[in-house]
Image: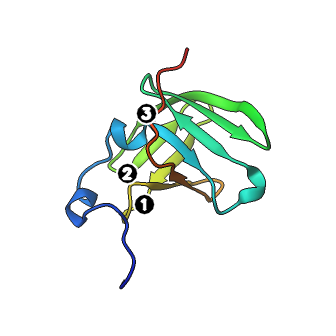
Amino acid sequence: MPGRTSGVSATAIDRPITEEDVIGVWSNHRDTELHQQIRFTSDHEWHEDQHGTRNLYHGTWEITGKRTVMLHDWEEEIRFSPDNYNEFTVVSFDHVLTKDRNTAAAPSQ
């Protein structure tokens, strides 16, 4: 599509997602009334904020496929966009989140 850049090269899309792709802070910019943010840490924990409540949901995460991550404790599947590894969908809720620039979540404390 002319004028559209995904920030990810075409060859990068052919590779499986990595921990580096997942780790960071992700925000829902489509359903803004949720004020939804998910933080993925390098020690494989995730923490979700919604409606101003911090750590409303949390658990561990695991890469389970070429473009999929499982959020354990809730058994929610995350599917990365085939066109852009800076965007994913929480499959059961159709929530689309994008990775905040220059973020890398540190291990939980």
Location of residue 86 by image quarter = bottom left
In the picture provided, is 56 more to the left or to the right than 23? right
Category of crowding for the residue at label 3, using alpha-carbon neighbours closer than 10 angstroms: few (below 14), some (14–19), many (at least 20)? some
How far is mark 1 from mark 3, CA to CA? Answer: 17 Å
- N-terminal label among 1 and 3: 3
Q: Position of residue 34 (x, y in %)?
A: 75, 51
Location of residue 97 by image quarter = bottom right
- N-terminal label among 1 and 2: 2
Of the numbered discs in the image, which one, if any, rests on residue 67? 2
The amino acid type, in three-letter code, at marker 3 is Glu
Quadrant in which the N terminus appears: bottom left
How far is mark 2 from mark 3, CA to CA? Answer: 11 Å
- Mark 2 vs 3: CB contact within 8 A: no
Label 1 or label 2, whichever lies nearer to me, is 1
The amino acid type, in three-letter code, at marker 2 is Arg
Location of residue 10 with respect to 53 vertically, above or below: below
- N-terminal label among 2 and 3: 3
In this figure, which residue is indicated by the disc labeled 1?
Answer: 81
In this figure, which residue is indicated by the disc labeled 3?
Answer: 62
- Mark 1 vs 2: CB contact within 8 A: yes
Q: Residue at x 73, y 49 (%)?
A: 35
Q: Residue at x 24, y 57 (%)?
A: 12
Q: Residue at x 56, y 36 (%)?
A: 39
Location of residue 55 by image quarter = top right
The amino acid type, in three-letter code, at marker 1 is Ser
Question: Which one is in front, 77 or 2?
Answer: 2
Of the numbered discs in the image, which one, if any, rests on residue 42? none
